[in-house]
Amino acid sequence: MTRPSAVPPPVTAVLDASSRWLPARLGEVEELLRQTVAGHGEALTEDATATLSAGGKRLRPMLVLLCAGEAGGAASVRAAAAIELVHMATLVHDDVLDEAPLRRGLPTVAASSGRDRAVATGDLLLARAFALLADAGDRRAVELLTEASVALARGELAQRQDAFDLEIGESRYLERCRLKTATLFECACLLGHDDPGLRAFGAEVGLAFQLLDDVLDVCGPPERTGKARGTDLLDGTVTLPLIEAAASDPGIRDVDLHGLDPAGAEALCDRIAATGALDRVRARALEMVATGKRRLDAAAFAPEQRQLLGLVADGVVQRYS
Amino acid sequence: MTRPSAVPPPVTAVLDASSRWLPARLGEVEELLRQTVAGHGEALTEDATATLSAGGKRLRPMLVLLCAGEAGGAASVRAAAAIELVHMATLVHDDVLDEAPLRRGLPTVAASSGRDRAVATGDLLLARAFALLADAGDRRAVELLTEASVALARGELAQRQDAFDLEIGESRYLERCRLKTATLFECACLLGHDDPGLRAFGAEVGLAFQLLDDVLDVCGPPERTGKARGTDLLDGTVTLPLIEAAASDPGIRDVDLHGLDPAGAEALCDRIAATGALDRVRARALEMVATGKRRLDAAAFAPEQRQLLGLVADGVVQRYS
């Protein structure tokens, strides 16, 4: 399985379009992330460095930096690193729960170092995130990030609670996405700049991100996503593509998710795709991104920031087109 | 298996000796704990309320309140609740790792609600702890508690890393206890009142607490501890009683911990006890408590506080006598 490249195209587009300050500051975030996970014992350094290197799009740090603008300085770098640490912590813990062997095409901490070490590694990343902000006295940032972490954990709990329940409807699904994903995007924007327009932008883009992620789980392909198709279905996670598909093909609700094997999950993916549900969910996500970008118009900041945030939002969509 | 009573004798002794303010404030801590875990969805409320009710000695909150004194007010109540939430989070996560069926004689969250929900519940308790302090703007408290949480996670990682390794020596063991237990006791004292004497007191009492806990794992009895003898051995955790025992009965180092079953673990407990190691470890712990109490003499505060802190320290010992 090919590992996705370290810097995905949408990020490159933003970096190409930006002035010098943004790539320089993203570099500082990387450096701070590395420093933060170093010096806490070999085991953590090893596990966390692997997680760091597995890359990811650094979308949330980029939102922090862009919303803060060039004047954001060291505080924006700290906030950007802290939010990525929280995001990494949840990934590490998710992999413990899902017993996922791969994340972004590389072995997960849970798979390579054991579930036990992965729980502790996630805890440490979370604690380091808060410590990073608390030590610098960034009171408002600590407040925003702790609230977002509460939402994240609530979202995870809700997802576990809803597992294998095909009666889950759209509003419950959207509430879960808000808790699990959109709140952290919202938080990234607010960490950069406390503005209701930016909050709304973050929330819409975050929700779109989760919808598209759920589409991608159904349509793959594995060489781009780094994981098998239908992974969510095997975990019992009922997502919008499934809910939408069941609206036009009600027999889908009779499938016993508990009894699925990987081949059965792929077959269910094909059945979902055959209903046209994926296009409908994609269209919903595009509409969310468009709404989010309109909310940016109301926010007061430099034209370059608005343009680059628009590119980030487009990148979320392009990644899945 | 009998559930240990909600208020263990040492705590009662402290409450009996104290003025009215301490029990009143402990009541406020309980109320704040209940409020804090409520309102985050049914699943959490259920799991966390069970964890809260399982009781525990509320030793750490009591240390916060006593070190803060009567003048500590609402800030000391918040700090006391926050440190107990962090402690609860680590217990919930520990039980996920150890796959423990019982904690304090009651089913663990991991056993009753599944490992997946337990990981998310622990994350939420942790995030709520920081949010509680951050929202109130208790900057120094956030700093202290995040640093302690980092130490806790490092201690957990170290314990997993050292598992089943009979070459682990005393200094490594003590370092692990410092990270895993003593730092949170130290933090409790500092949250109450930032004083080097109190820090030293907390560190010594916390270390003694862990040593005695490890003795108790070997000598039981289950009706008092709420878990089977030799649970640590079955998890591969090498503790001071085992290290001490191996010094006079070197054959112990040849035991294959991986191959232990519960009966084998009990037999190993008997073999450890036969070397007199338990008395030697108990004596070390008593010496630590005495050292801790001496350090209190240097701290400047009301005689009642010093007397009550001494009772708490004695309580740690008496619980195990």
Image: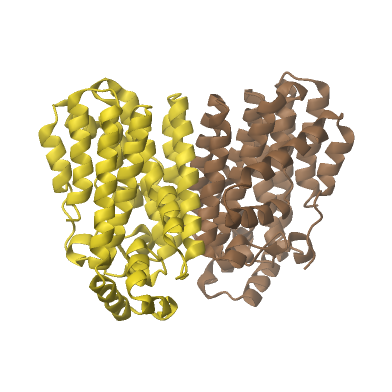
Chain colours: A brown, B yellow
Among the 4 quarters of the image, the one containing residue B244:
bottom left
Q: Is residue A4 left or right of residue B258?
A: right
The residue positioned farthest toward the front in the image shown: B248
Rendering coords of residue B43 (x, y %): 39, 51
How many labels, in total? 0
Task: Name the residue located 32 percent from the left edge and 69 percent from the top edge.
Answer: B245
Residue at 70% across / 45% down in the picture?
A: A285
Location of the N terminus of chain A by quadrant is bottom right
Vertical position of residue A199 compared to residue B100: above or below: above
Residue at image position (19%, 66%) is: B221
Res B198 visible: yes
Q: From this view, report whether residue B248 is shown above or below residue A41.
A: below
Which quadrant would residue B20 be assigned to in this image?
top left
Q: Toward the viewer: A94 or A44?
A: A44
| Image position, residue B258 (x, y; %) | 44, 77
Q: Residue at x 72, y 44 (%)?
A: A58
User: Residue reaching furthest left?
Assistant: B16
On the image, which quarter does residue A51 sit in? bottom right
Residue A286: x, y in percent? 74, 43
The residue most toward the right is A16
Q: Position of residue B139 (x, y in %)?
A: 47, 26
Task: Please indicate, yes or no, whether residue A164 appears anywhere in the rendered image.
Answer: no
> Where A103 sits versus B198, above or below?
below
Going by the image, does B308 lie left or right of B295?
A: left
Q: Nearer the viewer, residue A154 or B69?
A: B69
